[in-house]
Image (cartoon, rainbow, N blue to C red):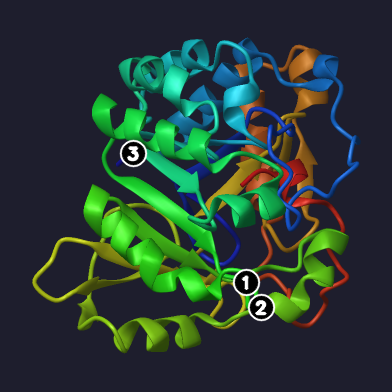
């Protein structure tokens, strides 16, 4: 039998979200506030060689899925060099990337050629002025990146829309039609109280049951299934291939099936997005830890994974921004 990582609550851990940078070329107000400059110094980033060592160790321990995240991963120079090395590691069967797609047009083919096959793209609005207000960026660059990714052959391409009451909740049907037209998968996500920016936006929270009810007024939705290691619950339009996912960290948490941990750009393992349990790998790597000891350290870290997050009960508990932890 292949090795497996199991946490104290008998959940198999087979999915690592790997942050290659905490920087981003957008400033989505619910993720990274205007004026935020508290970034990790480049000398504190894990090098490509260190990342490869850690992911290789996870592969030997039974992890099969790696998602490259940030910040915005495409701001990390020479990213396709890293993804090619990770795709070649034994045990790693699924390499995907989360992006805002601003720089995807010029990197798309190189990423595909390196072994990345699936993309998650953050896109909260199709209105250029609204996109500018939310992100301080240009929607046109994102659309161009999406079209380039489609042409390169990525599949599936998943559009992640954070639904915010009074901000973009009037675009639910528009986003369905956009994904319907281009063959993308669509996922709606509830806002989470990550750090001060998240808590200040609490009044924009909209539960997914309400989103689904709105969509059912326009479409005949039936249960759907989508391969992958994430937490989305899928529906689809009857008779069509379009999948519509609902991610519910607040209204219906999915902690009992959580199969993932996060590795930040500075080499810290975070066991839960909504808790502060962590384990620092960078000091061990730079002290010359052996491969066997690195695997033992990872097993020790997994033992710290909590049973569940407490976003609702203790919204003040996690004060780091999403960009610091990794998507």
Element type at marker 3? loop
Label 3 CA crowd tier, 10 Å (few <14, some 14–19, many 20+): few
Q: Residues within 10 Å of mark 1 (few under 14, many from 20)?
A: many
Left/right of residue 282 with respect to residue 12 in the rendered view: right
The residue that disc 3 covers is 2
Q: Of helix, strand and loop, which one carries label 1?
A: loop
Q: Position of residue 254 (x, y in %)?
A: 51, 72
Separation of marks 1 and 3 at Cα, in angstroms? 43 Å
* Nearer-the-camera pick, 167 or 117: 167
Residue 200 % position (x, y): 84, 70
Tell me if label 1 and label 2 are in contact, CB under 8 Å. Answer: yes
- With respect to residue 189, does 299 lie above or below? above
Q: Position of residue 3 (x, y in %)?
A: 40, 40
Residue at x 23%, y 54% (from the top left corner): 181
Check residue 164 in the rendering and tell me which mark sits there, or answer none: 1
Residue lying farthest to the left in this orientation: 239
User: Quadrant of the rendered structure where residue 145 is?
Assistant: top left
Q: Which residue is mark 2?
A: 205
Figure quadrant of residue 117: top left
Distance in Å between CA atoms under marks 1 and 2: 6 Å
Look at the numbered disc 2 and give the secondary structure of its residue.
loop
């Amino acid at each position: 039998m292949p090795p497996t990582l199991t946490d104290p609550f008998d959940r198999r851990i087979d999915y690592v979200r790997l942050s290659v940078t905490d920087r981003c070329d957008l400033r989505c107000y619910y993720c990274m506030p205007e004026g935020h400059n508290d970034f990790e110094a480049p000398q504190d980033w894990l090098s490509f060689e260190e990342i490869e060592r850690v992911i290789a160790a996870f592969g030997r321990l039974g992890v099969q899925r790696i998602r490259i995240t940030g910040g915005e991963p495409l701001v990390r120079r020479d990213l396709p060099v890293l993804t090619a090395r990770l795709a070649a590691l034994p045990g790693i069967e699924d390499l995907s990337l989360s992006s805002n797609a601003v720089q995807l047009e010029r990197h798309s083919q190189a990423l595909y050629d390196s072994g990345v096959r699936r993309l998650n793209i953050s896109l909260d609005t199709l209105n250029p002025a609204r996109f500018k207000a939310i992100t301080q960026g240009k929607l046109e660059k994102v659309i161009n990146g999406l079209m380039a990714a489609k042409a390169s052959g990525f599949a599936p391409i998943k559009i992640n829309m954070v639904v915010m009451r009074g901000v973009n909740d009037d675009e639910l049907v528009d986003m369905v039609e956009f994904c319907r037209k281009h063959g993308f998968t669509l996922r709606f996500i509830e806002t989470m109280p990550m750090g001060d920016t998240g808590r200040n936006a609490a009044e924009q929270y909209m539960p997914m049951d309400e989103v689904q009810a709105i969509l059912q007024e326009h479409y005949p939705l039936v249960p759907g299934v989508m391969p992958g290691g994430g937490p989305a619950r899928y529906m689809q339009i009857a008779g069509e291939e379009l999948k519509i996912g609902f991610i519910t960290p607040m209204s219906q948490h999915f902690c009992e099936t959580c199969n993932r941990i996060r590795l930040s750009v500075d080499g810290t393992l975070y066991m839960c997005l909504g808790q502060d349990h962590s384990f620092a790998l960078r000091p061990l790597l730079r002290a010359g830890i052996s491969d066997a000891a690195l695997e033992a350290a990872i097993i020790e870290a997994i033992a710290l994974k909590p049973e569940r997050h407490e976003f609702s009960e203790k919204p003040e508990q996690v004060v780091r921004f999403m960009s610091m932890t990794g998507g």
